Image (spheres, rainbow, N blue to C red):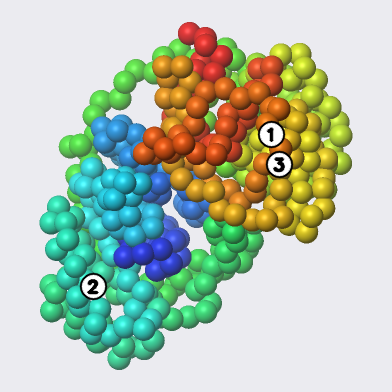
């Protein structure tokens, strides 16, 4: 028998990620084999999960995957684990179309119980109607229990517990309102650059969890027999012979693990650093991922040998896909939030700017002929003057509405703000029409 549950909340900012990381650490401290998942397209939380579990954090997303694909993905990574922890996204019922694609829909697809995290800082017995609503709004949701966050005192917790008892929702415990449990954040999410500070904070949360959360009750209330639900794996195909280069350093970090698995089926992956390496490795295909190039502008700009290597590769017909931060790096310049311009690779005839930050966020669909590829957009920068840059395909929102984002093309190089999720489908074959 194993345990598995979804961590959800009434809204963003309730403490899901802090508590998820603390729980992962507390469970690791018990020498349990823990597998983590993240609902939605988030890159950063999965990286933080991995820093604790030592395993890849896996995204679960019903916009990217069908319900059957979602279940196959979940069981694939859960089957060797003692416990699987699924961190939700936004509020429990917030999806791309009402509740469609929400944490609730993922919990139902996987038939997993939900642990509700409630920010109780300014609440007492009035928390009862909130709990009542979440218990009864969707009868298919199985609530394993509630954890109260930012609790002021033991007396405060007793008021909250009475409210939950009256609604007949199990109370799993609480976290006190403590500034030391606050994780550093930045504009694209939690600041995973501050690894030492995060580790210290997570250890403090895990230590507190061991005192004020009933982990035994949590594991007992979320037990399930995964072996009965796991389907036989399909036999893997022979590995391809492509040489694939993937960016990986402090500036370029955003990659879906399943995307890398899909690429590895095409051949051998070699990682490279636009920050630190002198040139591209010998490759048939280069994947220049997203990340935080705006935090490393001077160093990227001064690495002339890498820029020249990329320019030569593209001029000679080399095949490349660049996403978001990778696309910014391939422009003429990146302008920082103070208005300072730093020269980049100059593959595309546009600049990108951080000066007037504006959030661009949402699921996206890329239409390339008869093929539709899904992904998402999440950035604060903007493109300046791209009207003379060649584009291809058409990108729309999850509801098929036009969006102001393009897929740019130069020779065999494709670039976009859109982060593409392809899993085991071959983005290489889609872009370059190979079979």
Kindly identify which residue carries mark 1: 386
Tag 3–tag 2 contact (CB < 8 Å): no
First in sequence: mark 1 or mark 2?
2
Kindly identify which residue carries mark 3: 384
Residue at 42 percent across and 37 percent down: it is 401
Residue 372 in the image: x percent, y percent?
42, 24
Tag 1–tag 3 contact (CB < 8 Å): yes
Assign a secondary structure to mark 2: helix
Give the CA distance from mark 3 to mark 2. 46 Å
Assign a secondary structure to mark 3: strand
Q: Which mark is residue 130?
A: 2
Q: Residues within 10 Å of mark 2 (few under 14, many from 20)?
A: some
Mark 1 or mark 2: which is in front?
1
Mark 3 or mark 2: which is in front?
3
Tag 1–tag 2 contact (CB < 8 Å): no
Residue 173 in the image: x percent, y percent?
29, 74
136 relative to 181 in the view: left or right? left
Residue at 19 percent across and 75 percent down: it is 129
Give the CA distance from mark 1 to mark 3. 6 Å
Q: Which residue lies furthest to the front in this view?
A: 387
Residue 344 in the image: x percent, y percent?
79, 37
Assign a secondary structure to mark 1: loop
Q: Residues within 10 Å of mark 1 (few under 14, many from 20)?
A: some
Give the CA distance from mark 1 to mark 2. 48 Å
First in sequence: mark 3 or mark 2?
2
Residues 26 and 38: in front is 38
Residues 435 and 2: in front is 435
Residue at 36 percent across and 83 percent down: it is 122
């Amino acid at each position: 028998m194993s345990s598995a549950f979804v961590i959800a909340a009434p809204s963003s900012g309730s403490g899901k990620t802090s508590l998820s990381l603390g729980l992962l650490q507390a469970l690791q401290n018990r020498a349990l084999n823990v597998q983590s998942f993240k609902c939605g397209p988030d890159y950063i939380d999965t990286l933080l999960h991995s820093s604790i579990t030592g395993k890849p954090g896996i995204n679960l997303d019903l916009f990217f995957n069908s319900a059957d694909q979602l279940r196959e993905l979940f069981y694939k990574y859960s089957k060797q684990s003692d416990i699987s922890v699924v961190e939700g996204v936004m509020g429990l019922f917030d999806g791309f179309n009402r509740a469609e694609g929400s944490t609730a829909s993922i919990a139902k697809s996987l038939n997993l119980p939900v642990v509700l995290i409630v920010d109780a800082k300014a609440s007492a017995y009035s928390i009862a109607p909130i709990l009542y609503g979440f218990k009864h709004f969707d009868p298919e949701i199985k609530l394993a229990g509630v954890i109260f966050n930012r609790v002021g005192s033991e007396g405060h917790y007793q008021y909250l517990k009475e409210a939950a008892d009256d609604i007949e929702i199990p109370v799993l415990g609480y976290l006190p309102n403590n500034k030391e449990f606050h994780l550093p954040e930045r504009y694209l999410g939690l600041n995973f650059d501050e690894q030492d500070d995060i580790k210290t904070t997570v250890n403090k949360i895990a230590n507190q969890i061991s005192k004020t959360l009933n982990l035994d009750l949590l594991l007992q209330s979320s037990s399930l027999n995964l072996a009965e639900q796991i389907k036989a794996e399909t036999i893997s195909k022979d590995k391809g012979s492509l040489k694939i280069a993937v960016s990986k350093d402090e500036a370029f970090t955003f990659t879906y693990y399943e995307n890398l698995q899909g690429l590895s089926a095409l051949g051998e992956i070699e990682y490279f650093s636009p920050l630190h390496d002198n040139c591209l490795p010998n490759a048939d295909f280069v994947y220049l991922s997203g990340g935080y190039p705006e935090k490393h502008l001077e160093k990227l700009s001064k690495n002339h040998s890498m820029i020249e290597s990329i320019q030569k590769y593209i001029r000679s017909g080399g095949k490349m896909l660049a996403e978001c931060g990778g696309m910014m790096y391939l422009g003429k310049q990146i302008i920082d939030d103070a208005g300072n311009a730093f020269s980049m690779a100059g593959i595309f005839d546009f600049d990108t700017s951080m000066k007037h930050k504006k959030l661009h966020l949402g699921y996206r669909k890329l239409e390339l002929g008869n093929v539709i590829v899904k992904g998402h957009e999440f950035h604060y920068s903007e493109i300046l003057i791209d009207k003379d840059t060649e584009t291809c395909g058409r990108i729309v929102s999850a509801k098929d509405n036009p969006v102001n984002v393009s897929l740019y093309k130069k020779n065999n190089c494709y670039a976009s703000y859109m982060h593409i999720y392809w899993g085991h489908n071959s983005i290489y074959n889609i872009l370059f029409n190979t079979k």
